[in-house]
Amino acid sequence: MYCNFIDGKWVEGQAVSTNINPSDTRDIIGHFARASEAQAQAAFAAASEALAEWAAWGPQQRSDALDSIGSEILARRDELADLLAREEGKALPDARGEVLRAGQIFKFFAGECLRLPGELLASTRPGMTVEITREPIGVVTVITPWNFPLAIPAWKIAPALAYGNTVVFKPAELVPGCAWVLAEIISRARLPAGAFNLVMGSSREIGNVLLNDPRLAAISFTGSEGTGRKVAQAAVARPGGMARFQLEMGGKNPLVVLDDADIEVAVACALDGAYHATGQRCTASSRLIVTDKVHDRFVAAMLAKLPGLQVGDARNPATRIGPVVDAAQLAQDVDYIQLGQREGAELVYGGQAIAEVEGKPGFYLTPALFVGASPAMRICQEEIFGPVAAVIRVADAEQALAVANATPYGLSAGVCTTSLKQAAQFKRGLQAGMVMVNAPTAGVDPHAPFGGRKGSSYGPREQGRYAAEFFTQVKTSYINP
Ligand code: ADP
């Protein structure tokens, strides 16, 4: 039985959840404690108590702690990648990449502890100076989804701690194993009791406390748009003052392929962006917007490559596409594939659920490619969150840009072109937080800001030094010597 970590102690919950391997549903990964409301409240009490001691540690000691966490993640890369593949279904190459990223993020923020920025301004009043400093905000609730069970917690927890805040971490119900191992690694850094707390469990049982506890100062959330709205409403309505909140939600990311694109590069970007990590990335390229002149060549090249993406057990080294995360997500993917056909798009590859691979029962789905899709179809407007992509044929670059921007989302967007002029125009014109030129829409660096526009995100960017915008509060001091 894997326990919650509250106030520096491992504690059993009010109930137990069992976690299964989506590549082989007979394989039970473990039994995980589900926290009660009272335990979640105890976590906030402990996090609030720990603020003073954590602040007293000072930047060097905090930096050393985060550095040791990063080192352990990196040293255990193979073991953690295996757990991630087993629990979430991410194929090993993707899982190894995620573990590396989680380790690098802790290392980056270990450095940031010692680089807390400030500013000195001249005052309009003679003799006076104005000093601008950054302080911790307080207790941060960290709520994360299942699709990056190590990297997303890392990119919220590491900056929260680096800038002197304390954390109550609630991972997604489907991936307690990765969350527990991360907590175990953090526990070995011997932070003050309560500086970091893990409360696993159901959002139905403890969601209310996680969003409304009067001791929390901020909520950093990644997940669905519907839950994001609930977080925002709770943060604004919270008794005892509004909480700060940061939301990362969905995407419907376009990859534009222009007349002058290198088709080999475009196909590599599309295959990676649409299908790697089983398409379960908020930055996945689910809309492939291709100009008329190269459309048929692009589709033919995709069809030639798709059979090379082997579907199977995420831990099999030959596998490129692991299973979908669970039965509910698989049903949603299959529903969307059927909807696309009813809407009039042509399914030219894949889209079949497979009940068993090599005798292992799992949530397998072959990567699906539609052609003849039009921008207004629901499969081109709504986030599917599976290995499903639709090709939209457009006349020219101008139409491509208009179609690329025609969704409620704006997380990531890509363009494949060999023209510097076109690249510059798309870089300016794409309504997205991140723009990729001749690169997949998914896959970002651990030290660069991450986030989107329109319905994809709310609040300051995550990662890199931009994380300080959310995880610190500014103080302006006037000094008359
Ligand atoms: P996903 O489709 O990625 O599972 P969700 O928005 O349902 O997206 O879940 C993302 C995270 O938000 C999960 O950790 C989930 O437990 C949590 N969550 C869902 N509903 C609530 C809620 N009402 N209060 C707090 N957390 C919630």
Image (tube, rainbow, N blue to C red):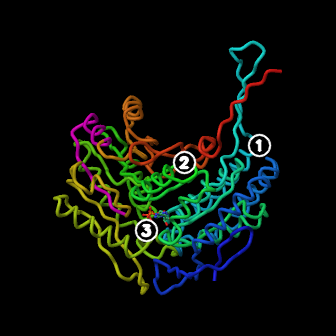
Q: Tell me where residue 438 appears, x and y as whole percent.
A: 43, 43
Seen from the viewer's position, the closer of residues 157 and 5 is 5
Residue tagged by mark 1?
A: 114
Residue 403: within the magenta?
yes
Residue 321 badge: 3
Residue shown at 76% from the left, 43% from the top: 114
Residue tagged by mark 2?
A: 242
Q: Tell me where residue 224 appears, x and y as whole percent.
A: 42, 58
Disc 2 versus disc 1: nearer the observer: 2
Q: Tell me where residue 145 appears, x and y as whole percent.
A: 50, 63
Residue 332: within the magenta?
no
Whole-number angstrom distance, CA of label 2 to CA of label 1: 30 Å
Tag 2 and tag 1, C-beta contact below 8 Å = no
Seen from the viewer's position, the closer of residues 143 and 339 is 143
Residue shown at 61% from the left, 63% from the top: 169
- Does residue 466 appear left or right of residue 403 in this picture? right
Sequence-wise, which precedes: disc 2 or disc 1?
1
Within-10-Å neighbours for mark 1: few <14, some 14–19, many 20+: some
